[in-house]
Image: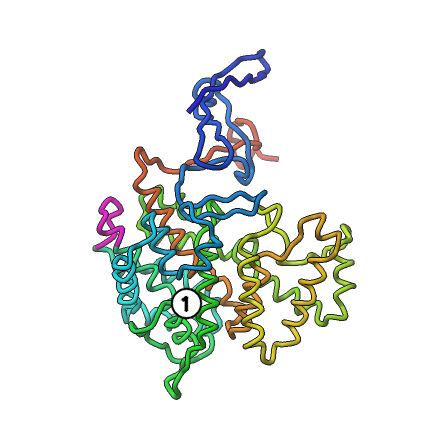
Amino acid sequence: MTNETYTLNNADGSTSLELPVKKGTLGPDVLDIGKLYREQGVFTYDPGFVATASCESDITFIDGDKGVLLYRGYPVEQLAANSSFIEVAYLLLYGELPTATQLAAFDNSIRTHTMLNEGMLRFFNGFRYDAHPMAMISAVVGSMSAYYHDTMDVNNPEHREIFAHRIIAKLPTIAAAAHKLNVGQPFIYPQNDLGYTENMLRMFFAVPAEPYEINPVAAQALDLLFILHADHEQNCSTSTVRMAGSSGANPYSAIAAGIAALWGPAHGGANEAVLRMLTQIGSAKNIPEYVAKAKDKDDPFRLMGFGHRVYKNFDPRATIIRKMCHKVLDQMGGKDAPLFELALELEQVALKDPYFIEKNLYPNVDFYSGIIYRALGIPTSMFTGMFAIGRTVGWVSHWQEMITEPGRRIARPRQLYTGAPERNYIAVADRK
């Protein structure tokens, strides 16, 4: 840590204040502004926290200008090419890639925690048949604290590990139960002899009346999507988990808060918006018209699934998933083939059009993930739930990091107050 002197120009004259600068392993330096209020009586103003580091973390690093995404220092491209989601989950939780023995033990633990308590499963029957899956998922995750209250001591390392394994294992079962309620089918129990994504596919699509055969391409595609969605630094839902957990609330409540934040259309709903956009365009022959609308700043139409708030050059996750998207469509296009052909034609237009190239409006991970989910037969309403399954391991990793931080403090942002100045109460009979 080094010190630099910054000059503050106040109404009373110029004052100088020496503020420490913290240097991370990678990324920009961070100015520690803790003394600003204590010594100068001023806050900083940063709506959306776009230039504020809210914590120290050694989990994930993003360089948006260079298109870099690292999990615990490992490029996501290497993990996507060589790892499974379960191995990446271990890496995020424990900080290092597992040995063969460690991976087998972790995988076995996740497999054997997939079942839901029968009382929790009956909880689903209290929802309307057409309830949004995210409403059910967030509610059921929150209810887990009523079933596992004997292992929720956030200061107990053993309890924290039980929670981590339990929530990662049960999220697919919870999401599948929400889907089954929506379609009016019986709940399908998990099978411990199946891998993570194979088990999830079976719980989603199997029915008791006939055998279900797992498509290996579908399982591979989901595993890859879960890897790419596993963590993404201090995004809205992850920051929500950390903030809720900073109060010492039970971890299931913190994860439920993250799920609620993810449900927002500006966060986890982007891939749903891609499918709605493709449906609106309707046909490849309409692409020139809609591309022109997207270029018109006075037209409200926007191409969804293009560009990214953080990545200013390209989204490394999109580069990885694009090949898998084409592989899935080649095998599983089916009745939605015209929609997928439209998507692929739009992709080619955007990759070649100077307007999109100049503005870095490349297809992002949401563009491809929505198409893959649709090809796998997952309904649009479940897209954000799928995102939540992959992101849960990131939420848990950040929650664990936050809860074990030395000198942990409850999150308490400040504000710029713009309301009425102090005034005196007026009796109702005297008000005009």
- Residue toward you, 134 or 73: 73
Q: Which residue is mark 1?
A: 175
- Residue toward you, 92 or 414: 92
Magenta stretch, residue numbers: 151-161
Q: Please state if 163 lies on the left or on the right of 37 as rendered.
A: left
The x and y percentages for residue 415 are 51, 33
Assign a secondary structure to mark 1: helix
**Mark 1 residue type:** Ala
| Residue 432, magenta (yes or no) | no
Answer few, some or many: residues within 10 Å of disc 1's Cα (few below 14, many 20 plus, some between 14 and 19).
Answer: many
The x and y percentages for residue 149 are 24, 55
The x and y percentages for residue 185 are 42, 80
> Is residue 397 depicted above or below 188 in this figure?
above
Evaluate whether residue 213 shows in this view: yes
Q: Residue at x 76, y 58 (%)?
A: 293
The x and y percentages for residue 65 are 59, 42
Q: Residue at x 49, y 19 (%)?
A: 4
